[in-house]
Amino acid sequence: MRHKIISAKSIKKLIEEIDNTILNNFTPTLAFVYSSVHYNITTLSKKLKKYDFLIVGSSTVGEIYANNNVTEVKNETIACMLVDLDKSAFSLKVKDLNKEEDYYKLGTKMAQWSKKQFANPAILTLTSGLHFDNDTYLKGLQTEVDNLFGAVAGDDNLFKDTYVFSQNKMTTFGALVLAIDRDKIDILSSRGFGWSGIGTQRIVTKSIKNIVYTIDDKPAINFYKEYLNITQDDMPSMGANYPLEVQLTNGQVLYRAAVYINQDEGSLIFSGHVEEGAKVRISAPIGEQIIDHVEESVSMTLKEKKDFKVDLTLIFPCAAHKNLLGSYGKREVEAVHNASQQTPLIGFYAYGEIASSKESNAFHNETFVTVLLREKI
Amino acid sequence: MRKKLLKKRIQELEFELNLLQVEHTQLEKSKLSTYNLLYRVNKELDEALANKQEFIASMSHELRSPLTAILGNSSLLAETGLTKQQQRYLNQLNDSAEFLMALLADLLDVSKLKGSKIELNVQETHLDKLLIHCANMVESKIAEDVELIVNIPSLPYYAFADKKRVQQIFVNILTNAAKFTKKGKIEFSLFEINQIDDQLEVIVTVKDTGAGIAENIKETLFEPFASTDVEEGTGLGLYISHELAALMGGKIEVDSIVGEGTCFKVTFYCEKSSLKMRNLTTNTYISKEKTRRNYEHLKVLIVEDIEINREFLKEMFKVFFSITVDMAENGQVAVEKVKKYSYDIIFMDMRMPILNGLEASKQIRDFNQTIPIICMSANVYREDKHEAQVAGMNDFIEKPLEHTDIETRLAKLATSVFREPKNKDINRLRQMSMQHFQEYFDEETSLKFISMAENGLKSSISNIEKNFSKKECFSLMENFHAIKGVLVNLGLEELSQTADLLQDYAKDDDFVNIEKNIDLFLEKVKEFFN
């Protein structure tokens, strides 16, 4: 697989670099374009219209790339990777959430479309919209396709508008799906944690989707206030630093960041669903060891598939990793780059991560999702 | 001059920036170290708590053995023609020992609940009868001036529930109501039952006209050691009930007015059985059989390392079943005895010095695949049951052994339930199913049922194989549940227990353990078609 990584500080510069690459006898089939909302994403999407290769685009909370031992974690840039993977192995669709459509239906439609493209598809999906119900959308996708990964677009922690786009379409409330033919591309994915539950486990006694009303029959707000004495002014950063560790009734453990406090109702609004009956406790980061955990998640995955020669690495870390690690964030990406055979890597810090394999729930917060792709010969 | 000043200022600013950058890096490092500190301390506290729970569990276990002997021997002593005065002393002794045993059982439960180690043992249950049984158990504890009103309608179907744990919830709450209600009434009602697909939402209320619960106590009512009664009671019952209801996906709500009374509303979930009005419960089965069975002729080997327990079991078999048992003090002696003599059944302790019950069973299975081996253990964690099954044991009894525990196994022996060969490939599954069905139906109907179940088995096997290759734990969970139902209907108890275990593994996304056990399980199930 040939590739070219571009890091640009203007849309114009990006287009120039892409054009130059093409002029130098490189014909990309697929591009990943991850941009800060510092740039006008509508203009960016329009400027990309002239290219005939598939474009997977998203707004970010920080852009990441690595190659040949060079690792970069950037802010307010546009990161782009052009690759020439087998064109027939990919198909792309961007869709707004129509008013008459629900999230689940959007998911099932996208999954059915993917199944029409390939008999055995995997899906890379990126979603936009701060209030987009990723849990329900992913449940819809899971009706037809079990191998899912991707992320939720970010906007530099401004929490206003997020975007996913290709050259033909852009949406601030919808989803992009890149269907991948698994008969032509091998895929491995891993998910690293970095947070750990502390304190006493309690039970969610009333919740509807992502709103938790009561924990142990007491207003949910009390639970967070007892530990952190937070107010709405501290959200969502405090919520992301100290997410809820949720043990679902099926035993699966996941993390959910509180994003909003409803003082009147005494409820907490989370970035994903929190099941009623789930056991919960507050969690905190485990410190610098996060880097080891994430690195280990990738190396363990590759250890299980000994002959897997990686062509391309896609990463989707939670923005909370960036906020927590600061300048150490680069070391985290370096560790993953080394663990993934130092292959070309691109990704972005996101507001949510998507990964499903054995687990029944695909939407996550606070994690670091790594996807390893290999072209079948 | 101006240029020089400007240059100097730039140098100063660069120096300050460098200092700020160093400070920023130090702060970042310090923040991460603080998180690391928090993580380590939390981990140490978790470990300390786990050790404490382990200690409580282990002490409760150790104390139960001698207490079992006290209780057992006192019941034997009661049969020896005592004077009234002796009988009174014995009753007091018995009451105290029983209280102590209940306390230890509660402590063990609390320890297991805290460590998330309680495993629901779900089986087909007549829910209405079970609830009525709870009321009957508590009736004697209710004051004379208090009327017990039981509103439990008959249910036309069975439910999959953990009898012991459901009973524990309601006996605790009813006992509590009995304790605090001196006059008036206690109403025990099946308030509501809702069906959502195959799932049943069961809501039961216990309403009393007792003293009521003060607001300050209400807040900590479901916390361990927070007894509503400051003078007696451990305060563990309501905590255990609350946690058990949560384990069943439900909850307990309380509504109380001081001086007027209290209402506990218990909600729990269980699955509705597809079987209608067919009697599969062991207790009913025994009560039907016990009047006419004679066990005198049976040759029983008891393997138990603690002498006092051995003696108690020996007496229990003699007094209740007229059986003179043979005994072994450890697994090694047991293996030698089984090689030398012929026994009908072995009751084997799990943990013993020299050679434990698991190893001894494995060794016995090398030369004898048919003799029923019943595991006796105070540890009833899922792992223990699984280990016992893997070692070739046929059944599992929780210590301390009760009269009915033993009788159930002897009755099974008498009706050939244990004749399924262990670890060897003699196929008698069909005969077992036939025997099972013929207990209820004629030959023709039995054959029809077996043929119907055969199709269900085939389709379940194919689904399991398909989803196993895809590592689809969620679908496997449903497949194991389905095949478990078919195996129960066929009367293949052990295989259905393995399916239940595999279902649990699938539920926990534990593919490693599924992988370990699935081949042997499918191989055994397929023997049905040989």
Image (tube, coloured by chain):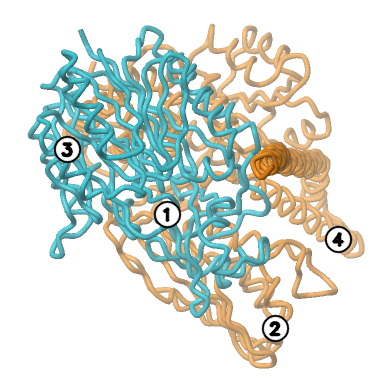
Chain colours: A cyan, B orange
Whether residue B65 is visible: no
Q: Provide residue B132's location: percent of width, then percent of height.
A: 50, 68
Q: For numbered disc 3, what is the local secondary structure?
A: helix
Q: Is residue B154 left or right of residue B404?
A: left
Residue of label 4? B87
Mark 4 and mark 2: Cα distance apart in space: 44 Å
The residues bearing labels 2 and 3 have C-alpha atoms spaced at a distance of: 66 Å
Residue under label 3:
A48
Of badges 2 and 1, nearer the viewer stands: 2
**In the image, residue B516 lies at what x, y percent?**
44, 19
Mark 4: amino acid: Gln
| Alpha carbons under labels 1 and 3: distance apart | 65 Å
Q: Are marks 2 and 3 in contact (CB under 8 Å)?
A: no
Looking at the rendered structure, whether the residues under marks 4 and 1 are on a common chain is answered as yes
**Is B434 on the left-hand or right-hand side of B361?**
left
Decide which of tag 2 and tag 1 comes sooner along the chain: 1
Amino acid under disc 2: Glu
Q: Is residue B236 visible?
A: yes
The answer for how far apart the CA atoms under marks 4 and 1 are is 38 Å
Which is more foreground, mark 1 or mark 3?
Answer: 3
Q: Nearer the viewer, residue A339 or B377?
A: A339
User: How far from the left and from the top, in percent, is residue B380?
Assistant: 62, 38
Q: Which residue is mark 1?
A: B125
